[in-house]
Amino acid sequence: MSSPAERYAAARRRAAQASQFPALEEFALDLGFDLDDFQREACQALERGSGVLVCAPTGAGKTVVGEFAVHLALTGGATTPADGAQPAPGGTRRKCFYTTPIKALSNQKYHDLVNRYGAEQVGLLTGDNAINGDAPVVVMTTEVLRNMLYAGSSTLEGLAYVVMDEVHYLADRFRGGVWEEVIIHLPASVTLVSLSATVSNAEEFADWLVTVRGETAVVVSEHRPVPLWQHMLVGKRMFDLFHDADAARKHDVHPELLRYTRDTTRRLELGEGRSAGPGGGRRGPRWRGPLRPDIVERLDREGLLPAILFIFSRAGCAAAVQQCLAAGLRLTSPEERAEIRRVVESRVTAIPGEDLTVLGYWEWLDGLERGLAAHHAGMLPVFKEIVEELFVRGLVKAVFATETLALGINMPARCVVLERLVKYNGEAHVDLTPGEYTQLTGRAGRRGIDVEGHAVVVWSPETDPRHVAGLASTRTYPLRSSFRPSYNMAVNLVGTVGADPARALLESSFAQFQADRSVVGLARQVQRNTETIEAYGAEAACHHGDFDEYFALRVAIADRERAIARQGQSQRKAAAVASLERLRVGDVIRVPAGRRAGLAVVLDPATGGFGEPRPLVLTQDRWAGRVSPGDFTTPAEVLARIRVPKHFNHRSPAARRDLAAEVSGTGLDRHAGRRGGRSRQPVGEDHRLTQLRSELRRHPCHACPEREEHARWAERRRRLERDTEELRERVAGRTGSLARTFDRIVALLTTRGYLTSDGTVTDAGRMLGRIWTEADLLVAECLRRGVWDGLSPAELAAAVSVVVFEARRDVDERASLPRGPVADAVDETLKLWSDIEADEAARGLTVTREPDLGFAWPIYRWARGEALAKVLASGHELDGEMPAGDFVRWSRQVVDLLGQLADSGGASAELRSTARQAIGAVNRGVLAYHTAA
């Protein structure tokens, strides 16, 4: 208990603070909880008139600082901004814009602020919604504010504060540049409040903010309001990752965990951990971790629900729910089940019954009523929103989610489980970074509800506990700018400030700020490498002759051998392609390699399409699917023929079983003639290779007894020289890199008639300046050439879809298109893209992404009024139907581009009218519900 003197001193301090920061004291009275030190420090900086950058962990309460900016705007309670700029003129209301990276977060923040300040004081502007846009407080996505700044919108009058929530999104490679555009272009009178997750280079980011925005206070807190305990689940045993907080700081893994995992790994290596199932001993020991239903049951027993279980695959999330249902898990009471059904039924009334069946509604509802759900981007948005609402209310107890949930709305849990520490990033399987690990596990621990949060990593033989300890303890995840000039940005900048000032603005970006700082370190590395190269050269010197000359011959021989091998590979592939193109229904072939090796019967030859042939086959193991030339190391040979029923359904297990039995009944050996590796076709001796080998043998250094030792040093020198040359190019490329890119873009736009030679924006340029899409120049060219004129609403939706859609994974074959006007328009679009790509490549610019035809059929059928089931089945997907969530998301993007066409001054009156009709045709059923939500 403190003494009377201490209590009196504390009261004096509070009274002094209240007199110094009256707006903060007034704001704090309505919060219902005491401010943390970092929140108070940031709010005081704001009330003094300074901008502020707040970096704190997920769930720490950063948004309180943003809400205080809202309070200051509504009450007019801050001092004059630090840069001396005057607040809004007397008659104008002070405004605060609250920006977020995603619509879901905007919607959530809008509802939070409406509950606090009332609907008349708060507005919402996203791509889907426009509610009370002239209110003093408007929540919006960052892109909306960027577009306002370029258009010189009257809504900006009186703007005093901008809150940029999740400002670390500026590292996002697709959308991050928007954050920097806003920060650079905001008027000097606006006070900026930047809220970020914990990053290790907060001071660097703040240094940049000071250069472009004036005084900016940096407030960093690494304190989690709810302590987080880290665990590992090894089989059926749960271990603490660290013994105590001191061990966590030193990255010292719990000794018992290390001992147990070492013993388990040793048993597996000795074969004791062999699986008991059929074939368990065939390929040596195999680890089988705990089943997903068992993990959920374990968490339930230990009072660790609600939990989010991160599985980095959409299919894996759906399968996890099915596994838990099959295991009979039920985590809810009868009262909770009734409430879940009431909430769900009230939210899906607008979706037609036949669509609900297609969307798997009844299976999804069964899972929800048991307290189980999946959450991923492939789900219908309203289904995701319902899962989020039920989880936050504690009605759904276990959610199986992809990592997209960690980037989304406020959805904390008591426990977070990571099934693996590897995820697919769209291009390859990569390890989680410390930043990603922290963001995922940051969901654990609900402020005001849980005393502590828990993060559990499921162990497997590939998972080293020390690696997990490093992820959990590392605090080095710097913010890296992804900003680069675009065509749209260039015409807007030139039109707003002129070419030279525009170049100066780009030079003031965080990207250039970081590039200029990094050049110093790179130049030092080049100098160190040059010294090392000289030392390696001395070690490689040979007294028999010129070893550099000898080594060059060795390199030339290796290069020539690789070129010949590639040539043979391409010949083998061509032979495989030709053999697959000749196949007919009923042909029995042998797949020589891969997981599907063995006999197979052809169900659909798939000839006559674009790209490589991918026949549909049924293997004798009852797997049905398409094979590609990559599965054939030798040409496909027809071994026999069997009769395939005319209307054979390869999705029917019984039909697959009967036909597979016929394949086995041919008596052919599934692996006949298989040799240990790829067949090597005899290649005639290459004259150049023979000549090089002869020169190598005649060289004096070939006789040196230390030849291989010299060669090792020469190889090290060659690699270091290559690395050093790359470093030199990076140094040259980074100095003034953005201005050079901008100059190239301006030159291209001038050549194409969007800018004049004296830097004036033409009518075509003004049209380009109002196109907000990744393929902005391609869209502008399509409008100028009339590519989309004369199309019907459904045809227009299909034609424009190719410039916005991007498949999640590459598909070898080209998607088909509706014949007639759509195919003609897409062909014209592809020609224009090819022309732009050649122009960009010639100027050293990043190439515009090639149009993707994979969404044309689904959006065409939907706009024509066809049923959702038929629409989803027409998606060009590798693994069956297009997920409903993907369909809605891409449809929204098509509608967004159609809306831009409807408002474009560069489009004909007919095209603008057709675009509006197309929007009406697309916004129906699940899309109409999503629009209203």
Image: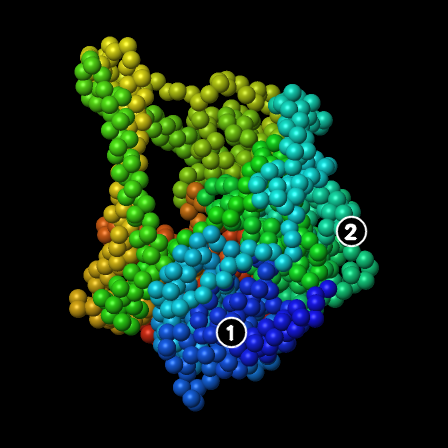
The residue that disc 2 covers is 330
Residue at screen point 24% across, 61% down: 746
Q: For label 2, count other residues whose C-alpha is less than 10 Å away and answer few (under 14), some (14-19) or many (20+).
A: some
1 or 2: tag closer to the N-terminus: 1
Q: Residue 807 at what x, y percent from top left?
A: 46, 51
What's the amino acid at mark 2?
Answer: Arg
Residue at screen point 32% across, 21% down: 712
Q: Quadrant of residue 821?
A: bottom left
What's the amino acid at mark 1?
Answer: Ala
Mark whose residue sits in front, 1 or 2? 1
Q: Is residue 505 visible?
A: yes
Side of 905 relative to 160 (left or right): left
Residue at screen point 44% across, 26% down: 633
The residue that disc 1 covers is 69
Nearer to us in this view, 182 or 251: 251
Q: Residue 427 at what x, y percent from top left?
A: 45, 44
Side of 678 relative to 735 (left or right): right
